[in-house]
Image (cartoon, grey):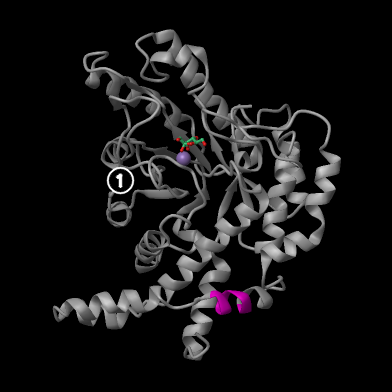
Amino acid sequence: MNDFAPETRSRVKQALRGQRVETASWAYGNSGTRFKVFPQEGVPRDPYEKIADAAVVQRFTGVAPTVALHIPWDRMDDYAALARAAADQGIALGAINTNVFQDNDYKLGSVTNPDPGVRRKAIGHLLECVDIMDQTGSRDLKLWFSDGTNYPGQDDVRTRQERLAEALGETYARLGDDQRMLLEYKLFEPAFYMTDVPDWGTAYLHCARLGERAQVVIDTGHHAPGTNIEFIVAMLLHAGKLGGFDFNSRFYADDDLMVGSADPFQLFRIMHEIVLADALRPEAGIAFMLDQCHNIEPKIPAVIRSVMNVQEATAKALLVDHAVLRAAQESGDVLGANAALMDAYNTDVRPLLRELREDMGLDPDPIAAYHRSGYFEKVRQERAEGQAAGWGA
Ligand code: PSV
Ligand code: MN
């Protein structure tokens, strides 16, 4: 690892230094499965405390300067004050995630519900979230719809698409010039026969119709097993329609485990497509967000670990020798082309990342530094009383 050419070393470090990963407010709160939520100590009780935890992740990683909010989980009176509190701690508020999946009214859907009154209510929430973005200074509105049906014939597929298009159109029209809409697809759950935005193709069709500021977001846990996610990444980059990622890992379904834990090779392949398209730079407009739940592991170190996993996959992707790869591809050298990827993937990039952190004035081992900091002991005491924030709360 330490025998890189100096140019490679500085090129890779420079790209990694500019990388940005957005953490999620809900990852700091209690979460679980539908069977049980195991509470943890020191968990934030309100959005301010979630922001404080996110700032700690930024303090030890240096590449996670924004935190996404979820409304109504992070509903409050004064979002501008929350944004100021974030700024005081060296971070900013990121994407606003909408939530039209938890009210009783949404049993048969939100924006695709057969009842126009329910559709209106759902659209009202989406518009309210744009109002919040105006106050937080957020760029991205993230839309995920649990809408779908459980039984064949339950509702008309094309009519639901029309209702969806109408809601998206009204919301898109409300966006400011510097704001974007990110549409997230998901194959299944909670609807089991059909979801209304099941795949990237459906999301792409809606976004293409809406315009430039509507982009597709890929949640890595939202596909059928075996789906070639990096192909989707390449296709959306090719079409100029990739707005970002909700990163997480899965073994079975939408497991929401730490990104890079179940299949680090897949994460590398995704980041390889990003690097090939020169889309790592923040100016390229791809939001690299985490959407994870730390049900049994301590939350802040898990978020730090996740950021490090993204950095490791990215560093490996940056090490792919594109000239060698391209030459092998063009001469039909199957094994040579594959080796160009595998050589990079099999490189131990951890020493380089430690060096990068030292260059950035950070501790080379962010998790050890977090444990030494005493932050957990402090919040464990401070937050002993009161109601811990939780997924869905
Ligand atoms: C849906 O499964 C999803 O991925 C959406 O992004 C939601 O907003 C999020 O999970 C909630 O954790
Ligand atoms: Mn998601």
Q: Which quadrant of the structure image shows residue 213?
A: top left
Q: Name the residue under label 1.
A: 225
Look at the image and say whether residue 157 sits in the magenta stretch. Answer: no
Res 321 visible: yes
Q: Is mark 1 on a helix, strand or loop?
A: loop
* Residue 47 image point, x, y percent: 71, 36
Query: Relative to residue 280, is residue 342 depicted above or below?
Result: below
Q: Where is residue 63 in the image (x, y as percent from the top left)?
A: 61, 62
Q: Which of 344 and 75 is in front in this view?
A: 344
- Secondary structure of the magenta portion, mostly? helix
Q: Which residue is drawn at 57% across and 35% down?
A: 32
Residue 37 figure quarter: top right
Can see residue 68? no
Query: Does residue 281 appear to the left or right of 333 in the view shown?
Result: right
Instruction: Choose between 10 and 345: the one closer to the eye.
Output: 345
Residue 365 against residue 123 in the figure, above or below: below
Residue at 65% x, 47% y is 299
The magenta span reads 350-355
